[in-house]
Structures are given as C-alpha cells and as structure tokens.
Image: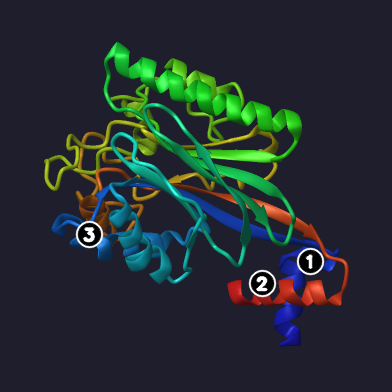
Amino acid sequence: MKLILWSLLVLFPALAAGQSYDTVRVCTYNVLNFSSTENTLDRIDEIRLILNEIRPRVLMVQELASEEGKKLFEDSIASRLNLPLTPVVGSFRVTQDSYVWVYYDAGTFENITTITLENDLRDQKGGHLRHLLSGDSLAFVTLHWKAGDTPDDEILRAQTGRFIRNFVQINNQIGEITATVVAGDMNVYTYEEPGYQFLLEELIDPINRSGAWHNNADFADVHTQSPRVRQFGGGVNGGMDDRFDQILLSPTLTGFYLPGSYTTFGNDGNHFNDSINAQPNTAVSPELAQALHDASDHLPVYLDLVFEKKTTGVEDEEVWTERLLDLW
C-alpha cells in the first residue's frame, strides 16, 4: 500500500503539495422523444450502455417527451447507472415539443436551487450546483431550440438565445453564480445565427470550431446529427452532417476545462453523411456504434472540468488519496 501511495504522489505531485483535483465529466444528450411508448422501451438498454461508458457526473437531457417519460428515464436509466444520477428538484410545465432536465452525481455536487428560464416557446431548465470539495458554484443550463431552417425558425431561436444571454449576464453582474455551462440541442446550422451569437456574448466554444457546420466535411469530427442514414422510430435520418449539440462555457471556466476532453461520443470523423454504425468506427466498439445508431438521432457530447481544492489537513488528504487509489 505504501509503495502504491508513493507512486501516486509521484504521478500526482499536486497531492503531495497539499492540492487536490477532481475531474468532472459533463454530458449533453438528446434522447429522442423519450416517453412510455414501445419505441422508447426498446432503447433503454442502449442508452444505459452509452451513459455507462461515458460516466457523466452532470447530465443534461433533451426530448423527455412527457412527465411519464421523465419518470421512466429516471427510474430505468439515471438511477440505475453505474454512477447513479439525481434529478435537480423542481416542477415543470408543458412547453412545445419537449422537456429538458439536468441530472447530477449527489456525491460530487449539491443542488442549491433549480433554474427555470420560462419562455413562450420553450422552457430552458438548469441546476445551480455547488461542487462539494472545491466550493465552486456553477449553473448548468440545458436547452432545446426550435428546429428548422426558415427565417421564422431563426427568429425563435434568437429569442431564446437572447433570453439565456441575459440570464448569464445578470448572474455575472451580481456574482450569485460564478460560472455557467450551457449545453443542449441548439438546432443551429452556422455560428453566424443570431441566437448563437447572443450566447457567444457571454460564453465560449471551448474547442473554437466556429463555422458553417451544416453539410460541411471540414467539421465532420464534431457533427452530432444524424447517426442514421435511414428513417425509423421517429428520428431524423440523413447521416452525420450537423453540429446541433454543443457545450458552451463561461470564459471563467477556461482554466477548468481539460484540453482535449471535448468529445462527440462515437464520432471518429470518418462518417460524414454516413451512419455511425458503418464499420470501421475507430472511436467506439461495434456494440457501442450500434447502440448510438439505435438509441437516438443525436450523438451525446461531453467534456471534462477540473476542480481544485487546497487540502488543509490529514483527513482531506486521506479522502483524496482514496479517490486516487480508486482511479488507479
């Protein structure tokens, strides 16, 4: 045991210096009209397989199609993951198209309050969470914007973009929330869209991949829709050609973001306008590629944030030593 601990202190010198780090995976996933229908029941095992592979500690979900669908997701997936996730507390109202919700690991965060950004078109949902070991206080906001490529669709997306921009701006001014993560299905085709530009007034794309994403092979590695070339189960087909699903961060989180961790799960960059289960897929196993194909018409996206805590005593160091040994 002493030899292993010494090795860990060599590999993680910050621990020996009295500093500890916790790497937290944040994920967004559109789970395609998740309800109590037979089509949904057939996809539960695939979604659970995918999320167990990703192991998120914060999960932002879109397209929970009803209150019954939300409860089914929690009972059959969130609470039954290898790392179980807890929903933020709160009620929700019916808004057009879908529900969105935030889930978190209760061993990593505490839910200070639930955030509901009410909008005439759709509500955005969030959680104001505090990282237990560092004390950092963050808002995690998830969204699902209006789909479509008409001028009216863009106007509706701009309305919700302005709404979220104002929320982030106000909280930055009063200092109630130190940083914000915004993630979800934005349904934007290019970074120049007004709704997306509103977000960029207060947030950053951590991988800095601005551009005209739609049907553009230059962005094949970050496309999230669609992992299918044929239509089935109510999802969109057409192959991988849109970057609809994204995670954006407050600039203050730049130092927390683990470089290289931003991942469009299952996308190896070699499936432009193709289905994600077309072999070979060098990013995931054939089993996971098939699960991603069957589970939804979107791919999940995740990144890692690293939180720091300065330890003050032997007890703190013992806790973090146990965490490192678990990782080892």
Q: Give the residue pinned by disc 2.
A: 324
The mark lying in front, picked from 1 and 3, is 3
For the residues marked 1 and 2, what is the alpha-carbon distance in whole angstroms? 10 Å
Query: Considering only order in the chain, which callout, 2 or 1, is on the residue closer to the N terminus?
Result: 1
Q: Secondary structure at mark 2?
A: helix
Quarter holding residue 140: top right
Q: Tell me whether circle 1 and circle 2 mark residues in contact (CB < 8 Å).
A: yes
Q: Amino acid at mark 1?
A: Leu
Is 316 drawn above or below residue 213 in the view shown?
below
Q: Give the residue pinned by disc 3.
A: 43
The mark lying in front, picked from 3 and 2, is 3
Q: Secondary structure at mark 3?
A: loop
Is 301 drawn above or below residue 51 in the view shown?
above
Along the line of sight, the residue nearer the viewer: 21 or 42:
42
Does residue 240 appear anywhere in the picture?
Answer: yes
For the residues marked 1 and 3, what is the alpha-carbon distance in whole angstroms? 42 Å
Q: Amino acid at mark 3?
A: Arg
In the rendered structure, the answer to whether residue 313 lies left or right of residue 143 reads right
Along the line of sight, the residue nearer the viewer: 99 or 313:
99
- Residue at 12% x, 41% y is 231
Residue 15 is marked as 1
